[in-house]
Image: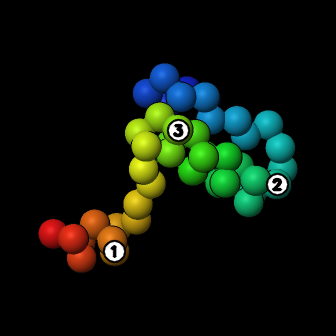
Amino acid sequence: MYMTGCVIPCATTFVEYCWLATLYNLNQCFSFVTDLQTTVTAL
């Protein structure tokens, strides 16, 4: 699966691994990862 030019590998049954790989790839592409609560607090 591709997301804005980033490869998100999920060829495994380990859900935690897929989640961590997704966060890693997003961080590599956009230089940050955040969650909704942090965003709302900052606003």
- Identify residue for label 1: 37
Q: Is residue 21 above or below residue 40?
A: above
Secondary structure type for disc 2 = loop
Residue 36: percent from the left, percent from the top? 34, 67
The label nearer to you, 3 versus 2, is: 3
Which corner quadrant holds the N terminus?
top right
**Which of marks 3 and 1 precedes in the sequence?**
3
**Amino acid under disc 2:** Phe
Q: Which colour scheme is used?
A: rainbow
Label 1: element kind: helix
Q: Name the residue under label 2.
A: 14
Q: Which residue is drawn at 60% across and 28% down?
A: 7
Q: Which mark is residue 28?
A: 3
User: What residue is drawn where x is 41% and y is 60%?
Assistant: 34
Considering the image in quadrants, where does the C terminus appear? bottom left
Q: Is residue 28 above or below residue 16?
A: above
Res 14 → quadrant:
bottom right
At mark 3, the secondary structure is: helix
- Mark pair 3, 2: CA separation: 21 Å
Q: At which x and y percent is residue 13?
A: 84, 50
The residue under label 1 is which amino acid type? Answer: Gln
35 left or right of 42?
Answer: right
